[in-house]
Image: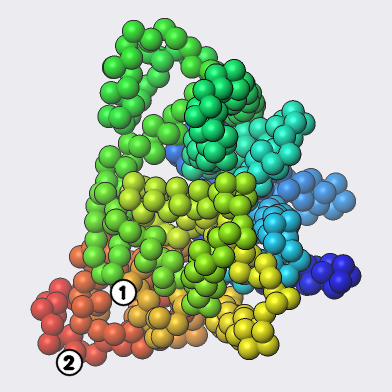
Amino acid sequence: MKINQNVFVIMLLGVILLLNVLVMRYEVPVYDEPHHYLYGTQILKLNSNKIDEGLMPFSALNVSLGVARVFLINLFRPGAQVDPSATLNTARFVTILFSLLLALYVFKWSKDLYGTSAGLFSLMLYAFEPNIIAHSHFVTLDLYAACMTTVSTYYFWQFIKFGGWKRATVSALILGSSQLAKYSCAFLYPVFALIAIIRYWGDLSRKLKLKDRAGLIRYLKSFFKFAAFFVIVGIVIINIGFLFNRTFTPLGKYEFNSSAFKSLQYKFAALKNVPIPLAYPYIEGYDLHKWHEELGGKQHGFTYLLGKYRKGGGFKGYYFYTLLYKVPIATQIFVLFAIAAYIARHKKFSFSRDEAFFLVPIIFFTIYFNFFFTLHIGIRNFLLVLPLLYVFCGTLLKDWGTFTLKLKGLVVSLVAYLMISVLSYFPFYISYFNELVWDRKQAYKILADSNIDWGQGGWYRDRYVAEHPGIYLNPKKPVVGRIIVSVSNLVGLFDAEQYRWLRENFEPVDQVAYSYLVYDVSQEQLKKTNYWKRRP
């Protein structure tokens, strides 16, 4: 059984690696990659000053591999021309390695809790998650955030379960390192505190009832001792990651942009000379992010959902829609089955000792991203929830050996459906929609931005244009003839009016890489619209 387990794990890891290598082969840099690559280069040059609010030191890991490749080429082939796109693809392999690492932890955690069959099942759900595949090979931070969230939570579970300063140190170091991956990981500190309270609430309640003051004080001392340790370790790692850039800058010396941070600075004016023990760019990034939210996401254009636009505030429940349409239907069924089965068999589990460690983050981030986060630009921001969700799905197969033949057949059938659905989109996984969108040319009417078009399809677009002489590429005004337009331009993320004439009067006849739509516009059709006089 052990050999079979290892074989299946290696096979699924091989699937993840192969899909990513094949998918990224012709994917041009997505919109955010150059910024992350540039910031990673800055970090290696010992400059951590922010050029954008979302950039983080983890990007230096990608650049390091790219730099190593160039160094080796120059070492063995002096004067050789280095292909920039090949260098970028080399840098992307670091993200792939983190995706493989995350896959192993999804398997390990599920296996540790629910057995080998459950571990393999969780790993399979991860391996055939199209949104994970889509973002597992870019020089961006979304996959890093997902990986560090899951690994940090796993080691926190290990620490709470078995105790000891060694495990506490490992947990604190990984949690601290997650702060260099993406700002959303900062929420793990209060989330972990909440998990600890849930874990020990029963013990605390009993001590309160018994009026065991000494025991209660011991618990509180231990909690605050470890909490302080975790925070101190995190602060040190953040400062190391940001190269101690202006660490201990007094509060009054910060030049904030957002009204929220300016308000805090004003309210705590009495503390203006108190040094902040964090690197300046780290705080600056939070401020810039808040500022862009206050501007209504002007930097990112409109927020788009179901044909509607919003310039600020986002859409409440946005990620419920992205999950509904962009997560495979078979996976959604497994999640619903897992929830129902867990409730029905809750006595077989220990929520406070095990499941709270991944269910609390799932619930927290689901609430936060749907109702408080406002820059709704794609499911990629929500990726950090999916691996934890697939660990939870392992509960479904805890008693796999007792399943009837029919029940096993149902599971196998759904797995087969999952694979067919996901592989049918190869190699265009950013644009994946499940079968609720049967006509893939209509996906733009539901979601846009990095859910479909993140600039990744440029190579396929150029090839299509070369094969169709005379075609109009993203025409700025109404034209007659064949037109190819990117989904982001079509829906009007930055200019809602430019392509209104096209999307409201015509239907696409073809698509390229699922991120570009093709239209045939005749003179007669265009004359029937109100845009005839606007043609060039």
Visible in this render: residue 71? yes
Specify the farthest residue to the front.
210
Question: Taking the image as drawn, is residue 245 in sight?
Answer: no
Query: For the C terminus, which image quadrant?
Result: bottom left
Q: Earlier in the sequence, mark 2 or mark 1?
A: 1
Task: Indicate left or right for 498 with 105 as reference.
Answer: left
Going 34% across and 60% down the picture, which residue do you hit? 318
Residue to which mark 2 is pinned: 524
Mark 1: which amino acid? Lys
Q: In the image, is residue 97 above or below residue 286?
A: below
In this view, the residue in front, 212 or 486, is 212
Mark nearer the viewer, 2 or 1:
1
Q: Which residue has dot 1 on it?
A: 445
- Where is residue 447? Give x, y as percent: 36, 68
**Which element type, helix, strand or loop, lies under badge 1?**
helix
Query: Is residue 148 positioned above or below 333 on the image?
Result: above
